[in-house]
Image (cartoon, rainbow, N blue to C red):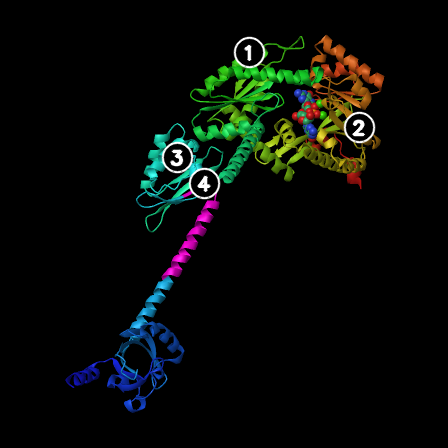
């Protein structure tokens, strides 16, 4: 009984549920015959409810079968106990996990058997177990995923033609794709876990697949190692198959180095194509620029080139230092050669001239052809004026030598005008050299002339005069003076020639020599003629009111003659009661005139206006021209008149002119009569009208009227 009471107190003390089961026979389910307090607490039953109940009521029915299956082998005869995890059912229907330990007592004589069951609550353990299992599952899933990712990655990088390799921080190859080996090392990459980065470089350097390594393998290896040590590689490599890759390295967070290559073949090809196009474009542009600056015929620079040279030198030396000279060269007889022998001859001359000039150039001299037969040399440096003079003389000499063209020896010749800084500022060099050239030509050809201070003064003055002329025209400061014309037979005044005078507000009355040429240069001579014409007609109409009007001769420039307002001119002329004549310069008839010119002349004649040929005998009018134009009157040049009394030759020439006039029915006036002798001689020669200082110089109309007593009879005036 002592043992029994110990067991009783053990059962009472333990936290585990303890029950005693009795099964009356094998295969008959046992029922509960005793339980401890811990059981009642754990299962929610008191012993009264429990005792006598079948053991199966203690377990979750759905799991009971499984439990039985688990412990059945232990329940067969001879075993001392069994063990199983069970899902226990509480009185309130809830469950908990328990560990069931069954201890079997030997069967009694009736065949029944008692057994003790100890149930320990293992819910907590179970829970932990479940969590652990869950974690395990998760890890496994992750591993599977990583595996899949890895293989996909491998597939992906393998499908790339660009080599990719990954090295760990110990410089061992981790992975590379299929093309890595063949491309970089010239062989498929075996799985060599021990291939170090350096081994790889060595092999790659000597494989002959990377073009830039060939012949400099060790150098390339050293560069690659150095690049890797600094943390990155960024190399453009061309492979033996002609394709190009940009090798780049990147460090990953774990210290792996990824070397990947980006295919650049197409990009490089495109770039190469582009740069070639760019180069072609640049060349074309340069060519165009060169051509824009070149003269096609001679290959020399052109006007634009000369401008650019000048700009450059001005930039370099400035205007003030006197280190720039511009030589303008004009060829004599070039136009003649061109006109008579043709353009081929002209071109040949220009080419030879350009060669001869080029041969004379100093290292810093620039030569350009700026017009038909105009060449310019720009030189710079110390003592430039002396050098320019010397060069000018050499040019004259070189161009005086004959030029052979198709077995013909052509003789040209040249004149040179030079301008230098600082007398001429940079921009004026060309204009001033031109002035010097013009002067040099007027002094006779084959000269060198340097533009100097006197020229500059003259130029300034004439420029100032030019401005003044325009103002004077506006202000109608130009007025007509009149010179009497005398009938040789009667000695009576029969006409007046209107001659322009500038009634200058400060300088007084100025002769045409001061302003006619300038007005012509300024293209206002036509306007000036019109002003003189209008004022002359107006004044004369008024003065000769009531008395027979004198003939009125007006000087007409070509500009005026060809101007479109000739109608107004005709109308005004028609209003004049006397006879109007136009004096045209002999030179107007020199050149072969077109239809328009003759048409204008005919209109004047039809309107009753006389046509007089001025300065006749001064040189060049042709008899043919005379016949064509058929003027009403010739005015014999006063130089010829001056020598008629003293020179037998002039007298003969004068007689011939008068004879021609007779033959063609053209009357003759002698100009510039200064002496009684001249009056006599020219009258005798048959000149019909006389004009000159002997009878009176040009003067204001009032003076003419007073001098020749042309007033309408005072008697009449006073008498009325
Ligand atoms: P021109 O038409 O031959 O005019 C005659 C010139 O000879 C005038 O000079 C006159 O003063 C000058 N003269 C007249 N008699 C004598 C003489 O006995 N001895 C000398 N030594 N000279 C004499 P002027 O007035 O100085 O005119 C010069 C030239 O200017 C004119 O030559 C004419 O070509 C031009 N001219 C004058 N007025 C006009 C004009 O209104 N329009 C145009 N287009 N030209 C004009
Ligand atoms: Ca005249
Ligand atoms: Ca004249």
Of the 4 image quadrants, the one containing the C terminus is top right
Q: CA distance from mark 1 to mark 2?
A: 44 Å
Q: Is mark 3 within 8 Å of ligand 1?
A: no
Secondary structure, mark 3, is helix
Image quadrant in which you'd find residue 72: bottom left
Secondary structure, mark 2, is helix
Q: Are marks 3 and 4 in contact (CB under 8 Å)?
A: no
Q: Earlier in the sequence, mark 3 or mark 4?
A: 4
Residue where numbered disc 1 is placed = 397
Q: Earlier in the sequence, mark 2 or mark 4?
A: 4
- Specify whether residue 77 is painted magenta: no
Q: Earlier in the sequence, mark 1 or mark 3?
A: 3
Q: Nearer the viewer, mark 2 or mark 4?
A: 4
Considering depth in this image, is 499 or 238 the residue closer to the camera? 238
Q: Main secondary structure of the magenta part?
A: helix
Q: Earlier in the sequence, mark 1 or mark 2?
A: 1
Residue where numbered disc 4 is placed = 179
Report the span colored magenta: 139-164
Where's residue 273, x and y in %?
54, 35
Residue where numbered disc 3 is placed = 204
Residue where numbered disc 2 is placed = 595
Q: Nearer the viewer, mark 1 or mark 3?
A: 3
């Amino acid at each position: 009984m002592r043992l029994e009471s110990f067991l009783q107190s053990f059962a009472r003390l333990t936290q585990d549920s303890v029950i005693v089961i009795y099964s009356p026979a094998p295969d008959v389910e046992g029922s509960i015959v005793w339980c401890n307090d811990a059981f009642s607490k754990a299962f929610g039953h008191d012993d009264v409810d429990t005792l006598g109940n079948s053991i199966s009521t203690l377990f979750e029915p759905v799991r009971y079968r499984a439990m039985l299956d688990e412990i059945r082998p232990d329940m067969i005869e001879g075993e001392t106990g069994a063990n199983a995890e069970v899902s226990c059912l509480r009185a309130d229907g809830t469950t908990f996990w328990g560990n069931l330990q069954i201890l079997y007592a030997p069967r009694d004589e009736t065949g029944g058997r008692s057994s003790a069951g100890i149930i320990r609550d293992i819910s907590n353990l179970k829970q932990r177990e479940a969590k652990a299992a869950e974690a395990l599952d998760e890890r496994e899933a992750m591993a599977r995923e990583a595996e899949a990712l890895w293989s996909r990655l491998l597939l992906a990088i393998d499908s790339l033609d660009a080599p990719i390799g990954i090295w760990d921080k110990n410089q061992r190859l981790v992975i590379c794709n299929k093309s890595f080996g063949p491309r970089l090392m010239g062989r498929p990459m075996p799985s060599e876990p021990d291939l170090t980065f350096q081994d790889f470089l060595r092999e790659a350097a000597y494989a002959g697949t990377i073009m830039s390594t060939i012949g400099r393998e060790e150098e390339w290896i050293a560069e690659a190692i150095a690049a890797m040590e600094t943390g990155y590689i960024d190399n453009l490599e061309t492979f033996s198959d002609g394709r190009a890759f940009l090798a780049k390295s990147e460090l990953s967070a774990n210290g792996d180095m990824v070397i990947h290559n980006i295919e650049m073949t197409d990009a490089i090809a495109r770039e190469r194509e582009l740069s070639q196009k760019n180069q072609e474009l640049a060349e074309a542009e340069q060519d165009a620029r060169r051509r824009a600056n070149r003269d096609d015929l001679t290959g020399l620079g052109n006007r634009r080139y000369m401008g650019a040279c000048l700009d450059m030198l001005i930039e370099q030396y400035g205007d003030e230092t006197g280190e720039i000279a511009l030589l303008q060269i004009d060829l004599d007889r070039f136009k003649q050669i061109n006109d008579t022998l043709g353009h081929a001859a002209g071109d040949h001359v220009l080419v030879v001239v350009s060669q001869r000039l080029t041969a004379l150039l100093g290292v810093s001299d620039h030569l350009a052809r700026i017009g038909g037969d105009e060449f310019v040399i720009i030189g710079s440096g110390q003592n430039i004026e002396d050098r320019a003079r010397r060069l000018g003389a050499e040019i004259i000499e070189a161009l005086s030598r004959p030029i052979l063209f198709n077995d013909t020896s052509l003789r040209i010749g040249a004149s040179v005008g030079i301008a230098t800084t600082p007398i001429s500022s940079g921009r004026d060099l060309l204009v001033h050299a031109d002035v010097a050239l013009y002067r040099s030509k007027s002094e006779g050809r084959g000269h060198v002339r340097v533009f100097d201070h006197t020229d500059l003064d003259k130029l300034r003055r004439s420029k100032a005069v030019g401005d003044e002329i325009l103002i004077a025209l506006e202000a109608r400061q130009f007025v007509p003076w009149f010179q009497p014309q005398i009938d040789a037979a009667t000695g009576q005044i029969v006409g007046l020639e209107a001659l322009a005078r500038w009634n200058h507000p400060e300088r007084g009355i100025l002769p045409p020599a001061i302003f006619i040429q300038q007005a012509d240069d300024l293209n206002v001579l036509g306007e000036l003629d019109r002003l003189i014409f209008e004022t002359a007609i107006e004044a004369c109409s008024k003065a000769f009111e009531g008395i027979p009007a004198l003939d009125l001769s007006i000087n007409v420039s070509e500009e005026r003659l060809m101007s479109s307002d000739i109608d107004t001119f005709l109308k005004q002329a028609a209003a004049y009661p006397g006879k109007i004549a136009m004096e045209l310069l002999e030179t107007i008839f020199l050149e072969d005139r077109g239809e328009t010119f003759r048409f204008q002349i005919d209109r004047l004649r039809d309107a009753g206006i006389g046509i007089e040929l001025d300065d006749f005998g001064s040189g060049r009018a042709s008899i043919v021209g005379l016949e064509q134009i058929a003027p009403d009157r010739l005015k014999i040049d006063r130089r010829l008149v001056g020598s008629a009394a003293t020179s037998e030759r002039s007298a003969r020439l004068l007689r011939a002119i008068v004879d021609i006039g007779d033959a063609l029915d053209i009357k003759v006036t002698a100009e510039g009569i200064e002496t009684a002798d001249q009056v006599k001689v020219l009258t005798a020669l048959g000149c019909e009208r006389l004009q000159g200082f002997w009878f009176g110089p040009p003067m204001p109309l009032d003076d003419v009227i007073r001098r020749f007593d042309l007033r309408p009879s005072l008697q009449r005036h006073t008498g009325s």
